[in-house]
Amino acid sequence: MRKIFFGTIITLFVSSQLFAGCMKTELTQLDNKLKNSAMSEEKKNEVSKLRDLVAKNEHSNSELAFKSYEKALRILNEI
């Protein structure tokens, strides 16, 4: 019984850590759009800073990461 309990707790902990706030696809999307965009260097730098904010905060502050991601997408779609 004790082994089952601890096994369940460990499994839940590991699975929650694997998927918590991961924005890998969003970061890849920003990288691809930034690479293929024909915008000014100033705008590219701004999007790069927002992308860095997303990467930095994706696990610690997911709300800020998502807001930064949305703002970067708005800038990229202004072209």
Image (cartoon, grey):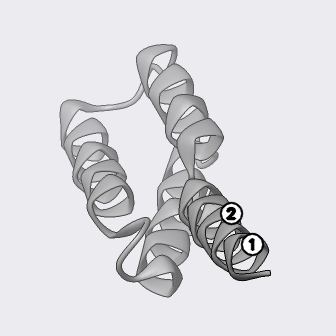
Q: CA distance from mark 2 to mark 1?
A: 5 Å
Q: With respect to residue 31, does 52 lie above or below? A: below
Mark 2 is on which residue type? Answer: Thr
Question: Label 1 belongs to which residue?
Answer: 8
Q: Is residue 73 left or right of residue 31?
A: right
Q: Where is residue 22, by image quadrant?
A: bottom right
Picture residue at 34% right of the left edge, 53% below the top: 55
Q: Is residue 39 left or right of residue 29?
A: left
Q: Position of residue 23 (x, y in %)?
A: 57, 52
Q: Position of residue 44 (x, y in %)?
A: 29, 37
Closest to the observer, 18 or 63: 18
Tell me the crowding category of disc 1: few under 14, some 14 to 19, or many 20 or more residues within 10 angstroms, Cα based.
Answer: few
Mark 1 is on which residue type? Answer: Thr
Closest to the observer, 74 or 53: 53
Q: With respect to residue 65, does 31 lie above or below? A: above
Identify the image quadrant of the N terminus: bottom right
Tell me the crowding category of disc 2: few under 14, some 14 to 19, or many 20 or more residues within 10 angstroms, Cα based.
Answer: few
Q: Where is residue 3, by image quadrant?
A: bottom right
Question: Label 2 belongs to which residue?
Answer: 11
For numbered disc 1, what is the local secondary structure? helix
**Contact (Cβ within 8 Å) of mark 2 with mark 1:** yes
Closest to the observer, 35 or 13: 13
Q: Is residue 61 left or right of residue 72?
A: left
Q: With respect to residue 13, does 15 lie above or below? A: above
Picture residue at 50% right of the left edge, 40% below the top: 27
Picture residue at 64% right of the left edge, 69% below the top: 16
For numbered disc 2, what is the local secondary structure? helix
Identify the image quadrant of the C terminus: top right
Q: Residue furthest top?
A: 36
Q: Position of residue 42 (x, y in %)?
A: 19, 43
Picture residue at 20% right of the left edge, 42% below the top: 45
Q: Is residue 12 left or right of residue 66?
A: right
